Amino acid sequence: MTSSKASTMKDVAKQAGVALGTVSKVINGIPVSEKNRLKVEEAIRTLHYEVNTYARGLKIQKSNLVALIIPNTHNPFFAGFADHIESSLYKRGMKLLLCCADGIPEKEIDYLNMAVNNKVDGIIALTYSDIGKYITRDLPIVVFDRFFENQVIPRVASDNFAGGCLAVEKLMEFGCRHPIYIRFHSVFPGESDKRKDGYLYACKKHDLEPDYLDVVDCDERIPVMKEFLTKHKNPDGTLTFDGVFAHTDYHGYLFKKLLLQEGFHVPEDVQIIGFDGIPKFGNIEDGLFVSSICQPVEQLAEKCVEILVSENAPSLTLLPVKYQYGGTTKE
């Protein structure tokens, strides 16, 4: 029995024996090799694949839907970002299609495929996968933080370098003499990498010896932190450092718990500054989990939407950050 299910771009790619991005390029008139173009066209005919011309990009007829790709909504920063994106779209008469990809490249590619097939008017992406080659030139997209070496895509981010510098400056202002840096991060490059650059720059500026834990794609964070902490204990049980700049608030929160379990006091023995500015219960009036370099989440979301719907977009837009007390520094 012949299936009544309509063929998809993935079916075409499989039939033709080419990448999904190649199919997308052929459909959108982007040059590919003659061999691949013929293979894709033959697969389209064989599968009777129909290209959906409804609302391509921000052209022709609009769906007034914008897809937001984020890793998940468990992380309060991602959840808050999504909430502000929705508000910004709504006031423009547009709706949000939320896509939680869990950092899985295949899911992110499926969402991009959906956009290419004209289900949405554009995409805002906060992604940690290498999906640059699947993004076509005519797809309206803005990325938060990430950049792709093979694509020039408008991106929005906080001033991470300045934030790294500010974290060190604040720790020193509050009496720290040996601030360390802790980071667990994705292998894929992004603007947030510049937080470490800011830390290193500030250390050099103030003649401090850099000391950091920098780990890629690690799920076992507590054991790694504990090993790092053990190596930084003096013979008398004191620590070789008195301040911590954590790559995120979550990393700072985890390290704070570890310090307390090991019998140290925060902020008396060790002061901690994170990065993000995540408020408790999603309400800034309830305070932060740790003292933090705060990202302007609402303004970042607004800027992403503003750039998505505009005709001329800068390649990079940076917004300023600020320090806020959260109980893990001396004031």
Image (tube, rainbow, N blue to C red):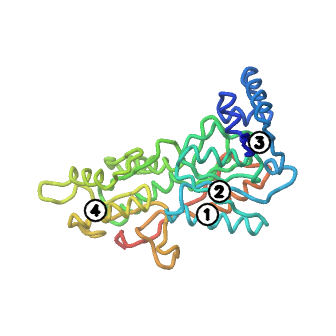
**Tag 4: amino acid:** Leu
**Tag 1: amino acid:** Ala
Q: Secondary structure at mark 3?
A: loop
Which of these two is toward me, 21 or 146?
21
The nearer-to-camera label among 2 and 4 is 2
**Tag 2: amino acid:** Leu
Query: Image quadrant for the N terminus?
Result: top right
Which residue bears the numbered disc 3? 138
Q: Is residue 49 left or right of residue 317?
A: right
Which residue bears the numbered disc 4? 258
Q: How far apart are the alpha carbons under marks 4 and 1?
A: 30 Å
Query: Mark 1 packing: few (<14 Cα in 10 Å), some, or many (20+)?
Result: many
Which residue bears the numbered disc 2? 68
**294 versus 193 height, above or below:** below
Query: Mark 3 packing: few (<14 Cα in 10 Å), some, or many (20+)?
Result: some
Residue farthest along the left direction in this orientation: 236
Tell me the tag on residue 82. 1
Q: Secondary structure at mark 2?
A: strand
Rendered location of residue 160, percent (x, y):
52, 53
**Of pointers 1 and 3, the one earlier in the residue sequence:** 1
Q: Is residue 225 left or right of residue 76?
A: left
Q: How far apart are the alpha carbons under marks 3 and 4?
A: 48 Å
**Of pointers 1 and 2, the one earlier in the residue sequence:** 2
Are the residues flagged by discs 1 and 2 in contact, CB closer than 8 Å?
yes
**Of pointers 3 and 4, the one earlier in the residue sequence:** 3
Q: Secondary structure at mark 1?
A: helix
Q: How far apart are the alpha carbons under marks 1 and 3?
A: 24 Å
**177 versus 10 height, above or below:** below
Q: How far apart are the alpha carbons under marks 2 and 3?
A: 17 Å
